[in-house]
Image: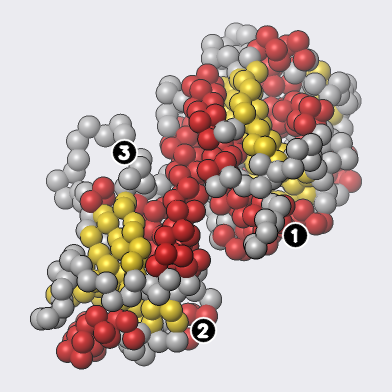
Amino acid sequence: MADGIDIGFGPLGQAGTGDLVVFVGDDLALGGAARDALGGAGADLVARAAASEKFKGRSLSALSLPAPAGVSADRLVVIGLGSEKDRSTLDWTVLGGFTAGKLSGRSARVVLDWPGTAATAAQAGAFALGARLRAYAFERYKTKKKPDAEDKAGTALTLLLADAAGGGREGEGARTLAEGVILARDLVNEPPNVLFPEEFARRASELTRLGVEVEVLEPGRMRALGMGALLAVAQGSVREPRIVLMRWNGGPAGEAPLAFVGKGVVFDSGGVSIKPGGGMEDMKGDMGGAAAVVGALHALASRKARCNVVGAIGIVENMPDGGAYRPSDILTSLSGQTIEVINTDAEGRLVLADVITHVVRSAKPKLIVDLATLTGAIIVALGQDIAGMFSNDDALAGNLAAAGEATGEKVWRMPLIPAYDKAIDSKFADMKNTGGRHGGAATAASFIKRFVEEVPWAHLDIAGVAMSSNASEINRSWGAGWGVRLLDRLVRDHYEARSAGR
């Protein structure tokens, strides 16, 4: 139970102990299986308790009460689902997270039916995913528990539905996807004195046990290749950089892979252009894009996805010592293009430039999606509930948007116009690494675009959603693991080979 919860599946009507969870709409009506579990007295008790507690069955509301006599349960938990309109747009993953939040540290049977609805196996799997994600907590460095803290590890749910066997199969898929998200969350939450570049590369290399081929590039190889942009970012730190290339070969041999590229700045002080002290501690999460790529490869390999995928992450620490790169330095990137440094805190795009060039040349991918906590400007534009998307390909952008709607990891397409590209022209080099304050997210994307050549590409600026994002029913952690579910769904719905019968 690495995620802090145990989830099983059983048929409707299965007996047991612990709590009993049922669902109602705003009319407080119970589904057939819930009525059978409670009996007539139980249904009457729900109505009377709802009136006493002014429980209206609104969406994502809850009422807890002692189980009625004759019902084998310690406690009855009634979850509200709202109006018929609310129920028609129900997000089963969110519902699973909300329900798990009401059951922390307890065991329960969850009756997945209500009037007019009986959960399918896929919906039960989504419910299980939400419950697993809600149960996550990063507490490995706490030496003492608060006296009133609940034992999350004691949470055990049995989901009851008509197709229990199908639910179990979907639940296994939910478990492996949750593992990928949790891996990404752990990476983002780790402190930088623990998760330095070499350690990050070591953890990514553990994907080999799932059949992922992993190659780690060390500084000597990078220098030989000519990765002058990435190496410049790293030169102020005593921690040497790494690039990790992860290959999942689940599709036809020789078929061009999808490429997912992540920015992995394990700590960003800003370098010589040092950041203000307030909030600098959050810069341990400046590797959220790389974490998402590692988590996605874990999820894809765990379910043996029928596609070829390359994951590439550039891992560096941006620090301001006497050897650090400076504003006005001119760097030669792996692509041969030269870059004038205006601000050493615009470092993530330099890392991505060399990693993307290497991926284009070595993997020859059919598309590239990069994820990066790149700019504060995207937070100003979109807040912390949605990521900015820039793309040179309408089909890829549409597929990402669809995957975002399906998973709740939503993206909003932002403009890429010639004016933004012109803003990064340099007087002294081919380009400069920042176009100034105005349109900062767009000029950063325009910089990356200069390195993707003709490959269909999308850049996701996840600065607002990857760390310190708004709490939700499926995440109470500082690190969100954002992007793992999005990439998995993108592959599943649009790029994965279909087997017979699917």
User: Within 10 Å of the Cα at label 2, are there few (<14), some (14-19), or many (20+) other Cα atoms?
Assistant: few
Identify the residue at horizontal 89%, vertical 46% (top origin): 418
Q: CA distance from mark 2 to mark 3?
A: 39 Å
Looking at this view, is 237 or 7 the one in front? 7
The residue type indicated by label 2 comes to Lys
Q: Are marks 2 and 1 in contact (CB under 8 Å)?
A: no
In the rendered image, is residue 106 in sight? yes
Q: Position of residue 186 (x, y in %)?
A: 43, 37
Closer to the chain start, of discs 2 and 3, is 2
- For label 1, the residue is 398
Q: Are marks 1 and 3 in contact (CB under 8 Å)?
A: no
- For label 3, the residue is 139
- The furthest residue to the left: 69
Q: Is residue 47 left or right of residue 231?
A: left
Looking at the image, is 232 positioned above or below residue 185? above
Looking at this view, is 10 or 218 the one in front? 10
- For label 2, the residue is 85
User: Within 10 Å of the Cα at label 1, are there few (<14), some (14-19), or many (20+) other Cα atoms?
Assistant: few
| SS of the residue under disc 3 | loop
Q: Position of residue 502 (x, y in %)?
A: 64, 62
- The furthest residue to the front: 500
Identify the residue at horizontal 74%, vertical 42% (top origin): 252
Looking at the image, is 269 positioned above or below residue 30? above
Q: Position of residue 407 (x, y in %)?
A: 57, 60
Identify the residue at horizontal 43%, vertical 71% (top origin): 163
| SS of the residue under disc 1 | helix
